[in-house]
Every structure is written in C-alpha cells, then in structure tokens.
C-alpha cells in the first residue's frame, strides 16, 4: 500500500477514536538473537583476530601457579560458561585454557614465541588458536585481567581465535559504588562487572554505614548498610581484584553525623538549618565522632587508603561561622583539620585521599596546598568535557599523587582519561552520584550512571582507545545492560507483525504533515524500513502507530489501536517511542492491553522514562527498556528508539489481541515494531 | 461526680482542640542562617493571627529544593508553601507539582502586574510574587587602583567591563570578573544584549545567528586567554563570592543580598568594596532580574489555608519588613516598593548596593522564558555551552546543536 492509499485509509480511520486490524505475521528464525558482542571492552592495546574458533568440546581449564588471582580467573570463566552457554567448564580437558604468569618459564617462553610477551604491570598476553587458549600474565593481576578478556571471546560455537598483548594505560582505575540498605542486591552484580571492565579499585561511599559509635550515639541511619555488609563488600571487592577505598565525607557534606538531630553542638554554623560542616575547633568533633568513625572504618574495610572528602566545604553554610573560627580563618581551619585526619590515619597505617576543589580553589591555591602533607592523594573531579585537564599537573607539581575524576557528560570520561595518561597522573575515578540510598536506581531510574562504568572501564584501561560512543552509539548502554544482568547466548524464532494497516504517521515528514509535523529536518526518515534487526531483535518496520497526545501536532490522532494476533508467544517485543518528551518522569503516558482468547487481560503500563521515552531523549535512565535503534535526523540531531521486551505470564494461552492506548498527554506513544518471540510453551 | 465528668470532658476537649491544630510548613531557599530571625518572626506572626495553626519554617539549599519538593509531592507529604524562583516555578508547573491559586482581584492588585504575570501560566496564577534584586557589581577599589583604573568610575557597559577585566588581569595577575555564564546564564546574556531566544510564535529556537555566536565567542576567548577563572563554569556565584571575599577578584557580579556574605567572610575586603550598577549591554538595556515567589504544592491538605499563608508571607507589610532585614532586596508589592527606605543610600557597600539596585529597577525584568520540558532543554543548553567554552566544540557547532535539540521539542 502506498503512503497515499494509507493516508486515505487513515483519514477514514481517524473519524473513529480507535483503530483495529488483523495482523499479518511473518515467521523468522531470529526474532531475538542474544549473541556475544564483537567489540572487546576495554579495548586491548594490541589485538588481532585470525579467522576461526576453538571448539568447546573437550575444553578444560589448566592453571599454572597458585596465586589467588588464578583461582578468581577460573571462577569467573566457569561462571561465564554457565551463564552464557548453560554448561560447565571442566577443570581439565583434552584441550586446555591455560592460565598462568611469566614467572613460569615455559609459559613465558611460549608468550615470547607468540610475540605477545609483556612485562607491563597488570599486563597479559592472550592467544587462542587450534591448540588451545593461553593467558600469560605479566603478574597475577595481569592473568586475571586476561581471563576477563577471554570471557568476551566466548561464543556458542567456541572461543574466537585471537592474539592479544595488553596492559593498562593508567595505574589506578577506580569505580565509585555505594553502601546502603540495598547494597547486597546491587553490589553483588556490580563488583563482578567492574572486574570485567578491568577496574582495580572501588571507592565505596560509606557515610551512612551503621558504625557502632553512630548506633550508640543515636545518629545511625536506618537506610545505611550494616558494618557486616560493609566488611562483606570490601572482601568481595578484593576477591575480584578491586582494592576497597572507603569514602567518608568529612569537614563538609557531614549531614551523616547530625542524623536524628544529634551532635548539633559540633556544627560549624550554629544557625544552619541543614547542618553541613563541623566545628574544627571543638575537640569533641574528633573525639566523639570523626576519629571513632575512622577507626571503625579501618577495622571494617582494612583499607590501604581512605578518602576523607573535604570538597565543597563552603558551598552551603558560613564557614567559618563561629567567632573563634573567623579569627583563625578558613585556610588554617582547613589545613589543621586535614592534618589531624591525615595523622590519625597514618597512625593506623592508612593513607589519605581528598578531593581537590576546596584545597585548590582559586582563592587559596597559591598557599594552601603547600601546607598539606605530600603523601596525600588528591582527586580532581571535573565533569565537563574538555580537551585537556591541566589541574592534574598543578596537583602533581605541588607534590601530590593526582587522580582525575569523571562523571557522565559525553566524552568527559574519555577526554579526562587521555589527559591523565598524557600528564602521567596516577589514575582516574569514575564517580557516580545516585544518592546515599539510591542503589536500586542503578537499574531503573539512574541507569545512565551505570552506563558510565563501561565508558570509564574502557578509557581508563586504554585512554587512547576510540570512545565507545564513536565505535557504536549504543555500545556502552547495551554492554552495561548485558553485564549487569547477563543472559544466555541463544537465538529465538518468532513472528514479525506487519503494522501497516494501523500506521497513523509515516516516519518521514517531507511536507510537515508526517512524523511530528516538524518537516524533513526533524523526522525518522533515517530509520531503516522493511525487515530490520534492531539490537538483538528483528522487526517489520514501515511506519508508526502514533496515538493522540496533547501537542497540537498529535491532537487529531486516535487514542488507541488494536492489532489482532490470535497467536501464542513467550514474549512480545515492542519497538516504540513517544513523539515528544515530558518532564514528568515515571508519568504513565499509555498502556498495552494484552487480551487472551479466554477473555482475560494483562495490562502493561507505559511509564515515561521506564518503559518508553521520546525519540529525542537519549539518556538511558532505565534498563527496563532495552536500547534499540540509534541514528540521526537529517540535520544531525541524535535520536533513538527503545525496545520493551514483555514476558508473557501466560505463554500457554493464545493472545487474541494487543491494544496500545494513549493517555493523551504530552508524551504520546508511537508503536513502530511488534515482534512475537517464541510460540508459547 | 458530675463536676468531675465535666472537668474531664473539658480537659479532653482542650486536648482535642490542641491536637486539631493545623501544621503548616513553609520552605525557603538559602535564607538560613542570615535571616533566621525574620523567618521565625513570620511563622510566629501567622500563628498569632491564626491560632489554630502551627507554622514551621524549613530552609533548603537552592541546589536541593526542586528535588526535595518533587519527592515530597510524590510521597503525598508536601509542605504548605514553597519559595521558588521564577525559572524553578516553570519547571515545577510543567512537572505537575504545583496547585493553581485562586486570587481575588483585590489580592492580585497588591502586586505589580509584571511580577504576577511571571507566576501566571495558561491564565492560572501559580505563585504570589515575593522579592527580587537587580544585579549589581561589587568591586574592590584597591585592585582597581593597582590596575590603574579609576575606582570612582566603574565600567558602565559590558564592553568596558570586559576591557577593565583584561587590564586588571594584565596589570595585577588577579581576575577581573566571573561572568554569569554557567548553567543557562548565557540565555539571559543573549536577551540582555537584545538577542532573541525564540521565534515570535515560539515554535523555533533562533539563538544560533552570527550575533549570538559572536557573543558566545567573546566569552570563549576570555576563558582561553585566562581572563576568566576555571571556577566560573563549575562553581558559579559560590566560587565568585569566595574569590572576591579572598581579595582576589576585582568585580563581583551579584545580587546585592550576597554582599552581606562578603561582610561575613572578610571585613577588610568588604570595607574596600564599592557598589556600581550592573553594566548594561546598550543593545538590550535590560537587566535579567530573577523573581522569587511563594507557591502551593500539589496535594496540600488545606489548599485555602496554604494560599492564605503564601499571601501572608508576601503581603505588603511582610515584604517591606523582609527588605529591611536583607537590606538589599526589593518587594514586588506596589505599596511597599514606594517606601522611602529604598531611596536612602549610605556609606557602606550594603547600603550603596540597595540604592544602586533601586535605581536599576526600571531596567529590571525577569527574562525567564517558558518552553516545554525546560529541565531537559536547559541541560542540553548547559552541556553544549560548556563544551564550547572548554574547546570541545566551536561556538557555532554548540549553538547549532542546541537549536536542533530545542526545535525537536518546541
């Protein structure tokens, strides 16, 4: 049917508030194909991929050496086999995955013979050929990192042939995580993922750990993690090669010590309504709160270093606010406090890390840093993408170890890592700011901050690597989703639904009467049509079943559309979006009603930002919806579509129909593709 | 027995009446601790006038108030009244977090029409206007002298201010100024320069013309040549006030109320401070002056009582009293604005600031624009301008990219 014919049909259809049409279905063998990615993350320094795969049959592990890291490598490989192939990787076999270090002369000789030998700390040589797979670490950590690479070479047909020589571009590669009452469920997923991304440390936000001293004083937070959980996470991190560095914010950002209205005699600004900083001239600050907390933190985490914050000290209340403090002045108060904490930690054989912004602020940079001990590590957060970050050299030139710290802006992480390498900084921290009690949001709510871990992992290991966004705009998102919640590699047959009889808007807009009536520069004309693979899914794409919304350009559309299926399916994949955004996150903008042959019905709400989002909105705040297509408009605006993978709770029953219903709000739903996965169990 | 029963009933009645007191919470933005006494006075005064109420004042940092309000509305426990700036109000209205108010004509006439219209969306009033304060320039006379500038003749235009800033940096090594270009500040600088943001029908963004690009390029060049400190983008007015208070910034573009912060942080610098009008861009001859208001969140238990509190906090007498406490802000009510207090100058920087501001009021306008999904469009704006400032994109590419994104949403 031509678009002209469709338009005539549409005009007729629009006279009624709802559309309905029987579906034409096309069977396909790969409605959903979960396959391993072809891009290794982090990108190795040197890699070749000769044609061929090492068969899985007869393959077994062979560890050479007794370092714990070799055992961790075996554990992770076995888990990978189990998760991806749902099979066991044996401890031995007729063909071996050999894992060891260059301390074994035979392995060192083989790595040299292969031309892949490296002595770089944490480096490794890895090769896979018809004789087997070999990982030879420059050290035990290197062997462990090599195993993480090998995991990514696994396919259902075997292990991809490869020749890799690899080592980190930055010495310290830190990812920030949180301790709260949701810690276990989230951190148990994150820690293996971060190891896979070849981080070697975690900065653990620990302000609200329920310290004994906090419990006794009545200022422990119910939302905080227990000390046992803190210790467990620290041990878990170590067992994945991640050095735990607790972050306990001090001087400023100390709302944690005033929980329940306690310790208010220690506040810096007595008139503050939101106690933010403490009084450094009151000895009780240290004896009652700060030193006991630091001591417990050392006992709990057994860290080599503690990050004591010291950022944004003057951003809220007056500092100094008390007359005795004013007489001393901010600079001396800051220095004296830092020295106190540094010396206390040093007495416990623990190093100190601080943020840079208060100590290196323009107002004090000329004099304050010179007064601090030079064994402090200074981490410089800067979340704006810039071509260079000279602050790292400023910190190093002042005599400190310097770390950069990035967040989420496009190319911010990548550029900062490159600057850190160029300026010989000690490393990078990938920060995350999801709130003190926000762990669950890492999957749904602030998932974009989880995606940043992938970008950080890639660029901290190999700062010179092409940014992932330039390799493939959805790569970081899809990788995060896959690493956080890995699924087996499998291909599922299914049926593509032809929606053409229901289409209300073309994807193109040559005359401002199409897509969203904005003209040819702002439309979806670059979305491929026909039978198209979008991420792991396949769809039949020809136009959009766009429904009514509050915007003028969507006001004449129907409020609902029904596709009659009369089929069984295990899952339904919806390729969809909204015409416009809404500022109301999680607002229900529509729903799918799935009606079964027996008359029963299941409703899938469409909450904005969770199940659906506008084609112009790129931030992947939720992983409930899978990343789908990414492209550009004619004038270069980045746009995207997502896939909602709906799991049928009644796969044994025939689905009679699926109806998309719009709530008629600003963000109006538009269904572009629908695919039935499986045929019902 | 009967007497005892009566007494018991009376006591029960008393305690029941006490329990029936309506608790009203109102939030303000960053007024603690400097203005604790005035806020507590207002709470007590409302309780006295309305004995069945129990009023609690809560001060919230500017950076936290929007999230806190959204969370409170979502949890079904909003405060009765919240202080929001005009741009925050736009976002909260769009997110469905506020209740429209029902004001009588007499109540509306208390306020100037322009401020009231700032809080009016689709003919519905969503807030009672409160205070505003045109920007001024506090300048360090000592640095001016060291740079060879006449401390009695501060720059009157943006162009001469930039020239002065360069001379100060070249001669003293200290920064001249920190322009308000962080966040969406450039949107207001464009308008102050007479450059449009949206097409007349508001369907298209138009701020990628040569003149817009040139204006952005001016600041990029200043940043590249180190005439603007790094903290400009990252820390905004907090960093500027800190640097000025340390005696290391010559000119502080600020709301006059923040001059009090300099007085707290460094009396010596405060004593060297004079206050000048915010330099106008001749092309625009207007000064963006954000207005504060009091709004009623969605889901309040007693909307009428909440509105009564909002009106009380922003009534004529209380606006005048608040201005006298802050010493530098101005009322949005007609009667209070005519008070002779605002025409009196003085010798210290605070008094000068008030006088200077009062003279600038005729150029003051809240230039906050209303466009759909402002939070997301503002982020696109901020990210791209930062990328241009930091050399990640050209000025043209940054503004083109913002316009593309805005046009898809307008």
Image (cartoon, rainbow, N blue to C red):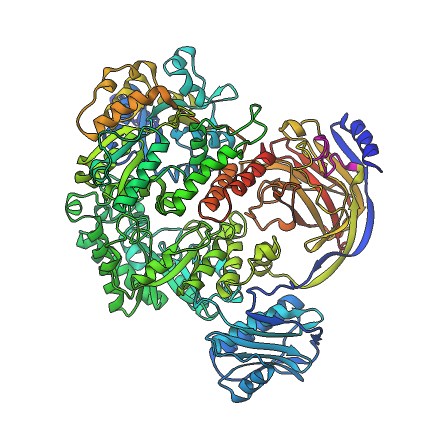
| Residue sitting nearer the eye, A390 or B296 | A390
Can you name the residue that lies furthest to the bottom here? A106
Instruction: Where is residue A525? Give x, y as percent.
Output: 71, 41
- B345 shown above or below A52: above
What x and y, as percent, mark residue A470? 59, 55
Compared with residue A667, is residue A350 higher up or lower down, i.e. above or below? below
Q: In the rendered image, which quarter is residue A60 located in?
A: bottom right
Q: Residue at x 24, y 59 (%)?
A: A370
**Residue A597 sits in quarter:** top right
Q: Quadrant of residue A309?
A: bottom left
Magenta stretch, main secondary structure class:
loop
> Magenta includes A349?
no
If the image is split into quadrants, where does the N terminus of chain A sit? top right
Q: Position of residue A418 (x, y in %)?
A: 47, 60
- Horizontal placement of B126 versus B231: left or right? right
Residue nearest the observer in this picture, A340 or A574: A340
Q: Is residue A510 magenta?
A: yes
Looking at the image, residue A487 sits to the left or right of residue B301; the answer is: right
Segment colored magenta: A502-515
x and y percentages locating residue B323 in the rendered image: 27, 24
């Amino acid at each position: 049917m031509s678009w002209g014919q469709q338009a005539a049909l549409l005009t007729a259809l629009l006279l009624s508030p709802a559309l309905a049409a029987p579906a034409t279905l096309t069977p396909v063998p790969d409605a959903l194909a979960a396959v391993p990615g072809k891009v290794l993350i982090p990108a190795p320094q040197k890699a070749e991929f000769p044609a061929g795969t090492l068969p899985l049959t007869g393959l077994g592990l062979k560890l050479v050496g007794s370092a714990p890291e070799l055992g961790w490598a075996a554990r992770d490989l076995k888990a990978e086999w189990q998760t991806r192939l749902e099979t066991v990787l044996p401890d031995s076999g007729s063909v071996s995955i050999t894992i060891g270090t260059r301390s074994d002369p035979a392995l060192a000789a083989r790595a040299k013979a292969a031309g892949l030998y490296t002595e770089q700390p944490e480096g490794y040589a890895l090769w896979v050929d018809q004789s087997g797979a070999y990982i030879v670490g420059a050290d035990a950590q290197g062997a462990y990192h090599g195993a993480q690479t090998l995991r990514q070479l696994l396919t259902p047909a075997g292990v991809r042939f490869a020749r890799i020589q690899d080592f980190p571009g930055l010495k310290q590669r830190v990812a920030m995580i949180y301790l709260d009452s949701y810690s276990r469920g989230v951190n148990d997923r994150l820690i293996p993922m971060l190891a896979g991304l070849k981080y070697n440390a975690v900065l653990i936000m620990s302000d609200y750990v329920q310290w004994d001293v906090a419990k006794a004083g009545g200022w422990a937070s119910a939302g905080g993690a227990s000390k046992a959980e803190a210790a467990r996470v620290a041990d878990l991190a170590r067992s994945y090669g991640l050095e735990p560095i607790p972050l306990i914010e001090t001087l400023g950002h100390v709302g944690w010590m005033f929980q329940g209205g306690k310790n208010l005699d220690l506040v810096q600004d007595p008139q503050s309504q939101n106690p933010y900083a403490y009084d450094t001239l009151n000895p009780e600050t240290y004896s009652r709160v700060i030193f006991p907390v630091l001591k417990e933190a050392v006992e709990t985490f057994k860290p080599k270093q503690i990050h004591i914050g010291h950022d944004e000290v003057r951003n809220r209340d007056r500092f100094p606010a008390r007359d005795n403090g004013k007489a001393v002045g901010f600079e001396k108060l800051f220095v004296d406090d830092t020295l106190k904490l540094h010396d206390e930690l040093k007495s416990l054989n623990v190093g100190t890390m601080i943020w840079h912004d208060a100590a290196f602020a323009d107002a004090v940079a000329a004099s304050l840093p010179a007064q601090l001990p030079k064994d402090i590590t200074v981490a410089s957060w800067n979340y704006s993408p810039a071509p260079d970050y000279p602050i790292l050299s400023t910190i190093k030139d002042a005599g400190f170890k310097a770390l950069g710290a990035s967040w989420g802006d496009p190319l911010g992480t990548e550029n900062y890592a490159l600057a850190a390498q160029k300026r010989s900084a000690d490393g990078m921290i990938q920060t995350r700011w999801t709130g003190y009690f926000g762990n669950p949001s890492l999957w749904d709510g602030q998932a974009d901050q989880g995606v940043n871990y992938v970008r950080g992992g890639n660029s901290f290991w190999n700062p010179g690597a092409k940014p992932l966004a330039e390799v493939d705009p959805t790569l970081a998102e899809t990788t995060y989703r896959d690493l956080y919640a890995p699924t087996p590699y499998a291909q599922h047959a299914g049926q593509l639904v032809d929606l053409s009889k229901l289409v209300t808007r073309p994807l193109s807009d040559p005359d401002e009467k199409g897509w969203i009536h904005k003209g040819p520069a702002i439309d979806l004309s670059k979305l491929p049509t026909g039978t198209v693979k979008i991420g792991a899914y396949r769809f039949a794409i020809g136009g959009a079943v766009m429904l009514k919304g509050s915007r003028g350009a969507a006001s004449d559309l129907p409020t609902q559309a029904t596709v009659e299926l009369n089929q069984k399916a295990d899952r339904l994949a919806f390729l969809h979006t909204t015409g416009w955004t809404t500022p109301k996150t999680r607002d229900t903008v529509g729903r799918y009603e799935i009606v079964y042959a027996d008359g029963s019905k299941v409703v899938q709400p469409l909450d904005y930002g969770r199940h659906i989002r506008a084609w112009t909105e790129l931030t992947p705040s939720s992983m409930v919806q899978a990343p789908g297509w990414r492209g550009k408009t004619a004038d270069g605006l980045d746009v995207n579509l997502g896939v909602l993978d709906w799991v049928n709770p009644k796969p044994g029953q025939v689905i009679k129909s699926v109806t998309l219903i719009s709530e008629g709000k600003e963000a109006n739903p538009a269904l572009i593709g629908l695919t039935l996965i499986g045929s019902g169990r | 027995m009967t007497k005892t029963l009566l007494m018991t009933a009376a006591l029960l009645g008393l305690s029941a009446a006490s329990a029936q007191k309506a608790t009203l919470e109102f939030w303000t933005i960053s007024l603690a601790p400097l203005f604790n006494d005035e806020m507590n006075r207002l709470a007590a005064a409302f309780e006295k006038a309305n004995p069945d109420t129990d009023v609690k004042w809560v001060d919230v940092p500017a950076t936290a108030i929007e999230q806190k309000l959204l969370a409170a509305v979502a949890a079904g426990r909003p405060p009765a009244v919240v202080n929001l700036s005009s741009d925050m109000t736009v976002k909260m209205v769009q997110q469905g977090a506020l209740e429209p108010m029902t004001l009588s004509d007499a109540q509306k006439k208390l306020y100037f029409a322009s401020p009231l219209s700032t809080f009016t969306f689709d003919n519905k009033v969503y807030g009672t206007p409160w205070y505003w304060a045109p920007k001024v320039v506090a300048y360090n006379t000592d640095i001016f002298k060291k740079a060879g500038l006449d401390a009695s003749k501060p720059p009157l235009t943006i162009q001469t201010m930039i020239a002065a800033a360069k001379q100060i940096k070249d001669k003293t090594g200290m920064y001249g100024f920190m322009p308000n270009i962080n966040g969406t500040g450039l949107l207001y600088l464009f308008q102050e320069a007479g450059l449009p943001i949206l097409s007349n029908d508001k369907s298209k963004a138009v701020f990628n013309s040569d003149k817009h690009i040139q204006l952005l390029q001016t600041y990029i060049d200043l940043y590249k040549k180190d005439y603007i400190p790094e903290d400009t983008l990252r820390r905004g007015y907090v960093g500027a006030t800190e640097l000025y208070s340390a005696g290391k910034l010559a000119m502080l573009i600020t709301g006059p109320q923040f001059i009090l912060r300099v007085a707290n942080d460094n009396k010596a610098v405060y004593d060297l401070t004079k206050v000048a009008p915010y330099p106008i861009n001749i092309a625009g001859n207007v000064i963006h002056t954000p207005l504060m208001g009091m709004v009623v969140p969605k889901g309040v238990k007693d909307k009428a009582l909440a509105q009564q509190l909002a009106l009380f906090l922003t009534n004529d007498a209380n606006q005048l009293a608040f201005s006298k406490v802050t010493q530098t802000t101005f009322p949005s009510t007609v009667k209070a604005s005519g008070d002779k207090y605002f025409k009196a100058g003085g010798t210290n920087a605070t008094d000068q600031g008030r006088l200077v501001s009062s003279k600038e009021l005729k150029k003051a306008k809240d230039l906050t624009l209303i466009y759909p999904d402002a939070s997301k469009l503002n982020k696109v704006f901020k990210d791209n301008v930062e990328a241009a400032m930091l050399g990640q994109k050209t000025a043209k590419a940054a503004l083109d990219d913002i316009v593309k994104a805005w046009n898809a949403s307008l």
